[in-house]
Amino acid sequence: MRRPWQPYISKKMRLFATNKTTLEVTAPRSYGRREAKAKGNLLDPVRGCPGAVTNGGRGCPWGCYAVEATRRQHVMFNVPVDQVLDADLLRKDLRKCHDTWVRIGVNGEPSCNWELTTRVAEVCRSEGKDVVIITRLWGGAPDPGLLSRLGTLGVMVHVTLCALDREPMRRRALAFLQAVNDAGGRGVLRLVTFAFSPLHPAREVQDALWAWGGEVLEQPGRLQPANPTYDEVYKPVYHPCMNHVTGEPNPRWRTAGTVYSGTACADECPTCHHQCLTMTAAREASPYHLPQTSATPQALD
């Protein structure tokens, strides 16, 4: 009998960790990003993401790790499901959490319910935790009232983009990041980068996103060779990624590493000194590994 496909179950929100964010993992395996039993600093007000249906069902141009992991569990990741906020229970978890900050948005898209996400952020701040929200804005931007509440909390919002996203999506995301800054929060462009050939049109767009004028955190894109995006990149500089569990190269995923120097997410959370930029905001302009092209923000048009 085949295992039925079903969406996430709506449960009370609890802090959790994954084998990316903690070294304390039980029963490790050589694939996937599984939730760890050790308590962490991760939260999902919404589980699931409508962006899962993009890129031929791979989710986003680089291929979403959560789409792959939930497929093995027969979970319909493309269906966002609100989770239940029990403020008292969440406060108990927060008081046991040794981290000074909480990440909202791991296995789900927070923008699918900004009201719930904002209330969760308010609970976290009431316990003295800094809040980092990571979103692709698949659910759109919050209304002005919610944005004002997030700004009052001093929330940091990362919006993930790449040069292969369509122009309206890029424009909308950058406008939202500026609105977050104007409201008193901190907007960060989480730029997923690829090593394009010097003549590839997306390269100039990527350079322009890097130079958009606000904070940028580079996240080197990881790709499976079967992903159509892999045909767009300069393959000679790609190499197997390191597996988080085994510490060995994983030929199923390839990366070119950082394209720019400065602040980058190298996917090594247990040893990361940046902690999604809660610890540092340093960034410096730098050249490509490949010959540099001239780019201006007008390339975003």
Image: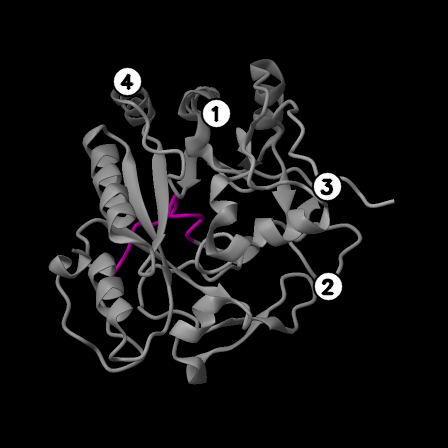
Q: Nearer the viewer, mark 4 or mark 3?
A: 4
What kind of residue is marked 1? Cys
Q: Earlier in the sequence, mark 4 or mark 3?
A: 3
Hey, which quadrant is residue 192 in on the image?
Answer: bottom left
Cβ atoms under marks 4 and 3 closer than 8 Å: no
Q: Which residue is drawn at the image coordinates 40% and 39% (left, top)?
A: 138
Please give left or right for residue 241 compared with residue 300 in the image: right
Question: What residue sits right under mark 3 in the picture?
Answer: 37
- Whether residue 21 appears in this view of the structure is no
In reply to whether residue 122 is colored magenta, the answer given is no
> Residue, x 24% and y 52% (percent of image)?
167
Label 1 vs 4, first from the N-terminus: 1
Q: Tag on residue 145?
A: 4
Residue at label 2?
A: 30
The residues tagged by marks 1 and 2 sit, at their Cα atoms, a distance apart of 33 Å
Q: CA distance from mark 4 to mark 3?
A: 37 Å
Quick check: 269 above or below 295? Answer: above
Q: Label 4 sits on what residue type?
A: Gly
Rounded to the nearest angstrom, the CA distance separating label 2 from label 4 is 45 Å
Whole-angstrom CA distance, mark 2 to mark 3, is 17 Å
Say few, some or many: other residues with alpha carbon within 10 Å of mark 2 (under 14 / 14 to 19 / 20 or more): few
